[in-house]
Amino acid sequence: MTKTTALLISLGAAATFSAPGLVLAQTPAAAAQPSAHPASCPAVLKHTFNRLQDEAPQDLCQYAGKVVLVVNTASYCGFTKQYEGLEKLYAKYAPRGLVVLGFPSNDFKQEDADAKKIADLCYNTYGVKFPMFASTVVTGANANPLYSELIKATGNQPKWNFNKYLIDRNGNVIDYFPSKVTPEDPTLVGKIEHALGG
């Protein structure tokens, strides 16, 4: 046994070398350690959705540990102007751990079928920088898995566009707000601030 191989084994290193026949496997202790990602991701966020602008799959576990505001959106609704308020809320509180997640939906027949038009409205008209996802179903038996969980947790399914669900840092669904509750509403802002820790 060479000194280098002995040193690697004594340090419990796991490495694969390109030299033929020289492969060191993980030590049993290292192999037995589970990945921290699944254990730290709350069940409500264990979903993947396609991003609006390019349909790239996005694992919602990337938002674990944040306060999450989930909103069903639409382009042709009287509440569409709430995009501005949602973006302001996101810009103000993102440094403290808030993320707003937008889910366009045509459940109420007020969303465009063209993802590029939705993205253009969000990003160019309203300056949205918070994460937006591909159009999806948010009500009824065909609601996407995230919305199914939100509905079950609150007893409230979206009755119109721009309904909001607030999830705390531990993945607990802590409140539901109907469309008429604007992003500037003191009740919503107060709940967000409380969830952020002050």
Image: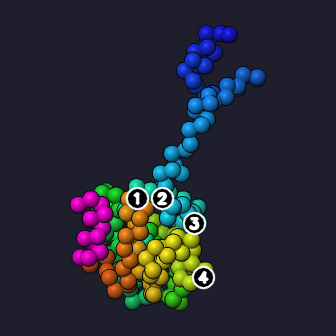
Q: Position of residue 55 (x, y in %)?
A: 59, 66
Q: Residue type at mark 4?
A: Ala
For the residue marked with disc 1, what is the amino acid? Asn
Label at residue 170: 1
Q: Earlier in the sequence, mark 2 or mark 4?
A: 2
Q: Secondary structure at mark 1?
A: loop
Q: Which residues are magenta?
A: 186-198
Which kind of residue does numbered mark 2 sit on?
A: Pro
Q: Which residue is mark 2?
A: 42
Q: Secondary structure at mark 3?
A: strand
Quarter of the C terminus within the rendering: bottom left
- In-image side of 148 versus 196 (left or right): right
Q: Is residue 190 magenta?
A: yes
Return the mark for residue 141: 4
Marked residue nearer the N-terminal end (2 or 1): 2
Going 45% across and 58% down the picture, which residue do you hit? 63
Q: Quadrant of the N terminus?
A: top right
In percent of width and height, residue 38 lies at 54, 51
